[in-house]
Amino acid sequence: MFSAREVESRYSIILEGYNKVINQEGLCTLDMGKTQILPATLSYQGALAKTIADTKALLGEGAVKAQLETLKEIAGLNESLKSNLDALEKALIMKMQMC
């Protein structure tokens, strides 16, 4: 059986460990997103846009409808990814300033 003080102390230690892990995971996610995932998706978006332009020049507008829809979707997802990475970075900076 633990006293109230011991329970509070153990809770504090566990919470501190949890916060450290969450912070490390956030920093790792931010790093991966900014240095690996976002550059790869932007590169794919650029390659897709070039392919669409080349196909459109050869075959006309009607030949690229599906690709254009995919490009719009990819562009929207990239925008969302960038916004979420920015929000994560802001949250991590705020957390670090609080400590």
Image: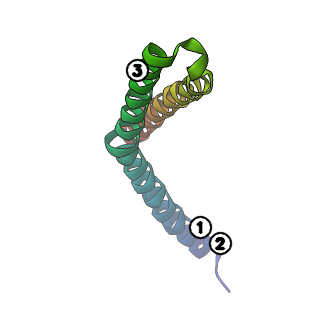
Which quadrant would residue 31 be assigned to in this image?
Answer: top left
What colour scheme was applied to this rendering of the protein? rainbow
Callout 3 crowding tier (Cα within 10 Å): few <14, some 14–19, many ≥20: few
Residue where numbered disc 3 is placed? 54
Give the Cα distance between marks 3 and 2: 71 Å
Residue 39 vs residue 77: left or right? Answer: left
The three-letter code of the residue at mark 1 reads Glu
The outermost residue toward the bottom is: 1
State the SS at label 2.
Answer: helix
Which quadrant would residue 73 be assigned to in this image?
Answer: top right
**Viewer-closest of 54 and 42:** 54
Q: Position of residue 14 (x, y in %)?
A: 53, 68
Give the Cα distance between marks 1 and 3: 66 Å
Residue pictured at 51% horizontal, 62% vertical: 18
Residue where numbered disc 2 is placed? 4
The outermost residue toward the front is: 59
- Of labels 3 and 2, earlier in sequence is 2
Which quadrant would residue 20 be assigned to in this image?
Answer: bottom left
Q: Is residue 99 visible?
A: no
- Of labels 1 and 3, earlier in sequence is 1
Quadrant (top left/top right/bottom left/bottom right) for the N terminus? bottom right
Q: Position of residue 76 (x, y in %)?
A: 56, 25
Give the Cα distance between marks 2 and 1: 6 Å
The three-letter code of the residue at mark 3 reads Asp
**Viewer-closest of 35 and 89:** 35
Foreground label between 1 and 3: 3
Residue pictured at 56% horizontal, 27% vertical: 67
The three-letter code of the residue at mark 2 reads Ala
Residue pictured at 45% horizontal, 30% vertical: 82
**Viewer-closest of 95 and 57:** 57
- Give residue 8's mark: 1
Quadrant (top left/top right/bottom left/bottom right) for the C terminus? top left
